[in-house]
Image: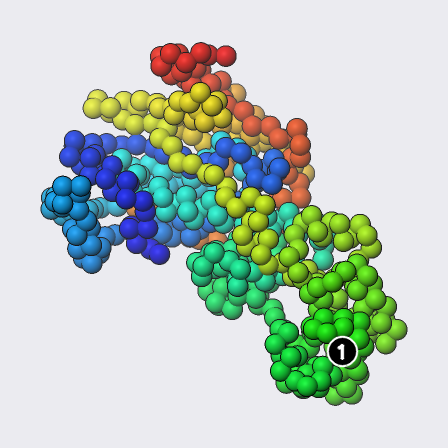
Amino acid sequence: MDSPLLTDLYQLTMGYAYWKHEMAETEAVFHLFYRRPPFGETAVLVAGVEPAVDYLAKLSFTDSEIAYLKTLKGADGESLFEQGYLDYLKTLDWRLDVMAIPEGNVAFPHEPLLRIQGPLIQCQLVETALLNMVNFQTLAATKAARICEAAEGDSVLEFGLRRAQGPDGGMSAARAAYIGGCDATSNVLAGMHYGIPVKGTHAHSWVMSFDEEQKAFDCYAEAMPNNAILLVDTFDTLEGVKKAIETGKKLQEKGHQLLGVRLDSGDLVKLSRGARQLLDEAGMSSAKVVASNDLDEYAIRDLKAKGACIDVWGIGTKLVTAYDQPALGGVYKLGAIRDAQGEWKYRVKLSEDLIKVSNPGILQVARIENEEGEIQGDIIYNEIDGLSEIPENHRVLLQKVIDQGQRVKEGEPIEIARERALKVWPNRPRGDQAIVCLDPKVEQTKRELLAQNGFPVQ
């Protein structure tokens, strides 16, 4: 996944056209941002930045990739790219400057999550990969944060690998879900690769492979006395709980404990309350009631409101697929380009749909916070001009992570991003509290560019 061919073909065809017209080395600035928050939120929880930065720091075209590009044909059957362009790509000196918002922060619409500056062709060639990495992980982290918030301090486990969009989707979702607040994942490869805690017990097939449910529970507990959470809904759920309790008693005799029971179907309110009562009456109040079965933040809130006695939530499909909004819709737009005299020329993407009109400049974000660290508002400003007024208690969000193609800021451990998210997400502005504004200088530049292109200025 580190290949520069992780891109759309049109990035390479535009690159070819830039090269042909001697524009490839023209300096440019692009911003990666989103326009509308997902899930009815005011903001997103930023994730996917670290993989994106790691990708940018390793870029180069291999011989095999250049050889593949040489096989591509145009409509006339001739080579799509001439050899000189392919030679240029092979020896490309990647020297991008990259600014990024650290993962685990919240970000509001139109704020750059990443700012990419450097040769025009290089900025262009990385667009697709950056959007792919940041869009999905930001979406999944935001969904996870909402789910964990609904759980109100209960443990939340990510169980979605089997329903994720391919192995890469499963890995990305596990990483983002952990940043968003999930305590563990069932994905063992994600556990090894990212250092995420892993959790798991057994499936219905274990119980079904025995003639008797009690025998299945006893054998599993004998094999895994330190991991005995038993899935009790293969046949009759509450009868399954009673058998799990019998297994728990045998564990106690050997100095171990039944860690819990898992419910995966049926009326989770009724069954969880029944399971809790049976466990407590048996003196197993420390045993947890774990629930799964197509859960999300809406289902969790509903179950809690109805009095469900659930301690641990296993969330799969609706988390890893961001079920109710499966794409963030982030974009990557040109904000400024140098002319032949070395002067910056600002650019806006025009549209009759006002939300699609981009902001010009080399953008930075100033975040204003109170003494408790609560966000009071953000100002998007042009870094060249600076802020029109310097607000108190502000900090800049975008931090330099790559300078001239070389990484200058080491990647944070995933635990740091998670800790930041757990602190910031609950204190995000809600509803109409979200305040994001353009610095007056940026606003003026935008108005002038709109007027120059015949767009009405409001």
Relative height, residue 117 to residue 150 (above, below)? above
Total numbered labels placed on residues in the image: 1
Q: Nearer the viewer, residue 283 or 112?
A: 283
Residue at 28% x, 51% y is 5
Q: Position of residue 372 (x, y in %)?
A: 67, 38
Q: Nearer the viewer, residue 287 or 81?
A: 81
Q: Residue furthest right?
A: 281
Q: Which residue is mark 1?
A: 244
Q: How is the image coloured?
A: rainbow
* Quarter occupied by the N terminus: bottom left
Q: Nearer the viewer, residue 411 or 45?
A: 45
Relative height, residue 165 to residue 257 (above, below)? above
Q: Position of residue 282 (x, y in %)?
A: 86, 76
Q: Quadrant of residue 270?
A: bottom right
Mark 1 lies on a secondary structure that is helix
Label 1 crowd bin: few (<14), some (14–19), many (20+), radius 10 Å: many
Do we see residue 269 in this rendering?
Answer: yes
Do we see residue 420 in this rendering?
Answer: no
- 22 sits left or right of 128 in the view: left
Residue at 28% x, 40% y is 10
Q: Nearer the viewer, residue 2 or 167?
A: 167
Q: Position of residue 423 (x, y in %)?
A: 63, 47
Query: Label 1 is placed on what type of residue?
Result: Ala
Residue at 52% x, 20% y is 389
Q: Quadrant of residue 17?
A: top left
Residue at 67% x, 49% y is 297
Q: Position of residue 103 (x, y in %)?
A: 51, 47
- 138 sits left or right of 216 in the view: left
Relative height, residue 396 to residue 50 (above, below)? above
